[in-house]
Amino acid sequence: MQLSVKHLLGIRDLIPQDIQTILDTATQFKEVLQRPIKKVPSLRDVTIVNLFFENSTRTRISFELAEKRLSADTVNFSASASSVAKGETLLDTVNNILSMKVDMVVMRHSASGAPHFLAQHIPAAIINAGDGINEHPTQALLDAFSIREKLGNIAGKKIAIIGDIMHSRVALSNIYLLKKMGAEVMVAGPPTLIPKYMKEAFDVRVEYNLRNALEWCDVANVLRIQLERQNQVLFSSLREYNLAYGINKKLLDSLSKEIIIMHPGPINRGVELDSDAADSKQSIILQQVENGLAVRMAVLYLLSGGREMNN
Ligand code: NCD
């Protein structure tokens, strides 16, 4: 099994068959993860460096654990504890790390396009773990895996992506993936957080009313308000955002059918999602995290050349 790409920079570059291959491989790894011994030797002798220039909890832990389960040798780098703080350039940092013979690089960076830049300059396989407001491909893949697991299929399903569409790399990667796999996609939220070009550029529905969005969809993928990326006032207050766009159990119960709630984390409880909805039985947020491990194992395995999987 092979992907059509050497790096995973974004869902934009993938063909539907790549997505299918990654999801099917992840299904096999999820099965491995249920076994008493969860470790396989697939990436023995492969060295991976995790370069995190931006904060992360679950994505970083998920990649590290995926690498360990595949028996890779790993090195972890975080910008705050490195020479980046002394003014070193990105290319210098990475060239130094590569002199140590690294095969793959997992990278998160606040600058959109940073992993694409690296891919042009170094021979290792690059996996984008989130670049600025551009893409977060493994998040979209684990979201798709979770939808497929829950609903059996992605094609024909109605997915509403709700909240801060403008600043969210999760939104963009999800839109590319869901459209490629034949889902119906809606973006919903306040007009100030939805770029004007969404409908024309991505062929998605746009909805400004939360209840209409929830009534329409099978799955609501709720996004965090990216306060750290907003340099102007785009809504009046968090409390007002919660009143107009916050999802709670009462609202879910008042809908004509039971929908599925997803969120990439970290949740701003009481802003985009209230605890009674986040922790309800309609929420698959923790399954998403669990599935993230299998999906990242699949991506690492396939980009390393797909060697023996089960022995
Ligand atoms: C997302 C991210 O970092 O882009 N989180 C994640 O990876 N689980 C979403 C977010 O920060 O809101």
Image (cartoon, rainbow, N blue to C red):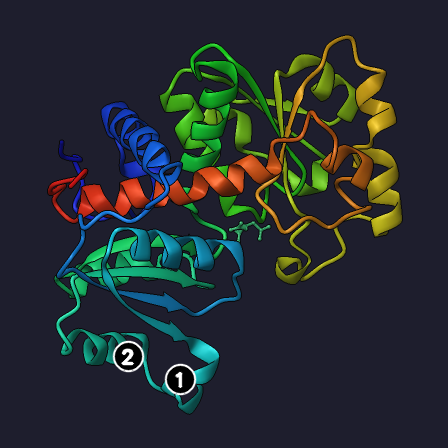
> Is disc 2's CB within 8 Å of ligand 1?
no
- Quadrant showing the C terminus: top left
> Relative to 181, is 135 above or below?
below
Q: Which residue sits furthest bottom? A: 86
Q: Nearer the viewer, residue 203 or 163?
A: 163
Which residue does the numbered mark 1 point to in the structure image?
82
Local secondary structure at mark 1: loop
Measure the C-alpha gap from mark 1 to mark 2. 9 Å
- The answer to which quarter of the image holds residue 145 is top left
Q: Nearer the viewer, mark 1 or mark 2?
A: 1
Q: Nearer the viewer, residue 211 or 37?
A: 37
**Along the horizontal axis of the image, is 226 left or right of 278?**
left
Q: Name the residue: 79% across, 46% down.
A: 271
Q: Nearer the viewer, residue 43 or 9?
A: 43
Which residue does the numbered mark 2 point to in the structure image?
93
Q: Does the rendering let one see residue 201?
A: no
> Relative to 55, is 152 above or below?
above
Q: Name the residue: 84% across, 41% down.
A: 242
Q: Name the residue: 58% across, 49% down.
A: 167
Residues at badges 1 and 2 in contact (C-beta under 8 Å)?
Answer: yes
* Residue 47: x %, y % from top left: 19, 64
* Residue 116: x %, y % from top left: 28, 56
Give, as a three-letter code, the residue at label 1. Answer: Ser
Q: Name the residue: 25% across, 74% down.
A: 94
